[in-house]
Amino acid sequence: MLSVSTVGKPAFKIGIDGGGTKTEFILTDVTGTVIDRRSAPGCSPSIITPAAIHAIVSDNLQALGESARQTHPAATITDTLFCMAGSRSFWSEFAVTITGFGRVQTFDDSFPVLELATNGKAGLVLHSGTGSFVAARSPDDSTHFAGGLGWRLGDPASAYDLGQHAVARAILELQGWAAPSALGAEICQATDLHNANALTRHFYADTKAASLISTFAPHVTRLAASGDEVAREILCASVAKLAELANEVIARCFGGNTNSRLPVGLSGAILRGPAVKDTLATRLDWRCELHEITEAPIEGVRRLLARLPS
């Protein structure tokens, strides 16, 4: 950890955004300027082992520390900020093992997108990726998180949720209980399975079914954008459930305050289509002012680093 001997030395900060797919690292100076950045495989503790996580993190921290010293031989790391997917307790315990990199703090991976959505002020973010969540910053600056239950328990408007409903629709069509649709045909073509029992067995037997199901989400969003009614119904119904969750968060965090609008950022490709925006505009609390988040989460990490007290 830092000691008083670091005072007066050139100061740098490290930020990390870690998910199941990839992990991004940045080194910044005290002004928030990015000095170096690195990318590595995903490091979610629900996917890889603690040993693998340790290797990914330690290798990249050491590399960024070296970059800081190349910038100035007397450089010191004052802060390291982890914004990570997965178990909070795991990352809290992991952070204790990190020494020599200043003050180490851990946050959920929702914090960077919340920062992008609200710029440190009161507001919300709705995020939809493989999973989904709602995060909020209340007027008292407290932060709140809802959703993020994962594929086993369900995340509305997530890639998994859309894919799951698409597969279910295809099976019902093959059983003869739903009218044939372009979406059902695409699911059968993508799996090369054209029998209801075979399609059902396939997803129950495949150990990687969760990841596979998520890959069907683009079929839903693309067809919905082209005007396909079945795909649009699936997409809008799923997004409406995310809006319900957001409204619950708004009611509890912002109460009956009707004097101001609430900035609400939309994060993730699923939330960008016109059908989605129409659904959200209809279902969300009237105070919400929607705007798309186009920056990557690591930019949110950079902003959080810049706001850390020296």
Image (tube, rainbow, N blue to C red):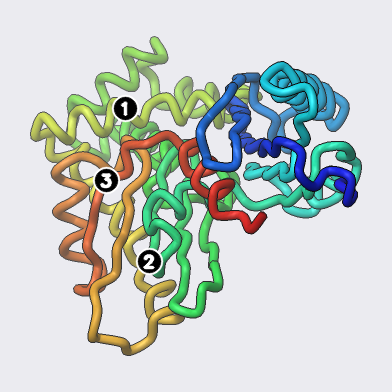
Q: Secondary structure at mark 1?
A: helix
Residue 56 in view: no
Q: Amino acid at mark 3?
A: Glu
**252 shown above or below 97:** below
- The circle on residue 218 is 1
Q: Is residue 62 left or right of residue 68?
A: right
Where residue 177 appears, x then y in whole percent?
Answer: 26, 40
Mark 1 and mark 3: span between their CA atoms? 18 Å
Amino acid under disc 2 = Gly
Instruction: Tell me which corner region of the image, top left, top right, bottom left or bottom right, holds residue 225.
Output: top left
The residue wearing badge 3 is 292
Q: Is residue 203 shown left or right of residue 243?
A: right
The quarter of the rendered structure image containing the C terminus is: bottom right
Q: Which residue is pictured at 80% across the width and 44% down the height? A: 102
For disc 3, the neighbor class at 10 Å (few under 14, some 14 to 19, many from 20) is: some
Kindly identify which residue carries mark 2. 123
Q: Nearer the viewer, mark 2 or mark 1?
A: 2
Give the secondary structure at mark 3. strand
